[in-house]
């Protein structure tokens, strides 16, 4: 286990629903090619804070890597709605681009 992963895990013990820590753990596992662990942390984040806009792009991309395209499309669409409510046009644009690339790859 990397030092960063150990540190984040310790932080999570004192703040088990902290969105930033959950997201960081998911990204750390993704970087270590632990897709199942990354997915588990993304889903935990989705449950803890469904308004965390940054989640949806990365979760969608992970679903794409796993070739679960239906879940990726659904995740991008949910993310577009969440980012719209948050007024985050940048995230909404990124999610829309990811969705477009997935639905019409040409």
Image (cartoon, rainbow, N blue to C red):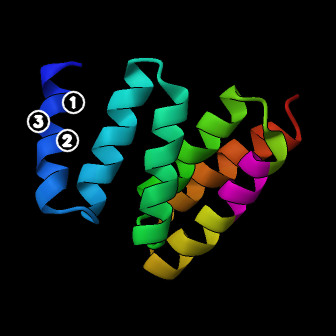
User: Quick check: marks 1 and 2 in contact, CB under 8 Å?
Assistant: yes
Identify the residue under disc 2: 9
Residue appearing at x 44%, y 77% in the figure: 86
Viewer-proximal residue among 16 and 50: 16
Quarter of the image where one finds residue 15: bottom left
Residue 75, position as x, y percentages in the image: 67, 56
Identify the residue under disc 3: 7
When the figure is inspected, residue 7 is found, relative to residue 65, above or below; the finding is: below
Q: Residues within 10 Å of mark 3 (few under 14, many from 20)?
A: few
What secondary structure is the magenta-colored segment mainly? helix
Residue 56, position as x, y percentages in the image: 55, 54
Residue 90 visible at all = no
How far apart are the two marked residues, 2 and 3, measured between alpha carbons?
5 Å
Q: Residues within 10 Å of mark 2 (few under 14, many from 20)?
A: some
When the figure is inspected, residue 17 is found, relative to residue 58, above or below; the finding is: below
Identify the residue under disc 1: 5
Residue 46 visible at all = yes
Residue 17 is a magenta residue:
no
Residue appearing at x 56%, y 61% in the figure: 92
User: Quick check: marks 2 and 3 in contact, CB under 8 Å?
Assistant: yes
Q: Which residues are magenta?
A: 71-77
Left or right placement of residue 11 versus residue 92 in this view: left
SS of the residue under disc 2: helix
SS of the residue under disc 3: helix
Residue 50, position as x, y percentages in the image: 48, 71
Q: Residues within 10 Å of mark 1 (few under 14, many from 20)?
A: some
Residue 55, position as x, y percentages in the image: 47, 54
**On-image quarter of the C terminus:** top right
């Amino acid at each position: 286990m990397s030092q960063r992963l150990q540190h984040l895990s310790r932080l999570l013990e004192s703040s088990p629903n902290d969105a930033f820590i959950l997201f960081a753990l998911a990204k750390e596992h993704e970087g270590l090619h632990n897709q199942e662990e990354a997915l588990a942390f993304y889903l935990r984040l989705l449950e803890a804070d469904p308004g965390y806009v940054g989640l949806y792009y990365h979760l969608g991309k992970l679903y794409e890597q796993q070739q679960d395209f239906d879940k990726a499309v659904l995740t991008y669409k949910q993310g577009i709605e969440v980012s719209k409510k948050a007024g985050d046009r940048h995230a909404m644009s990124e999610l829309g681009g990811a969705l477009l690339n997935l639905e019409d790859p040409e």
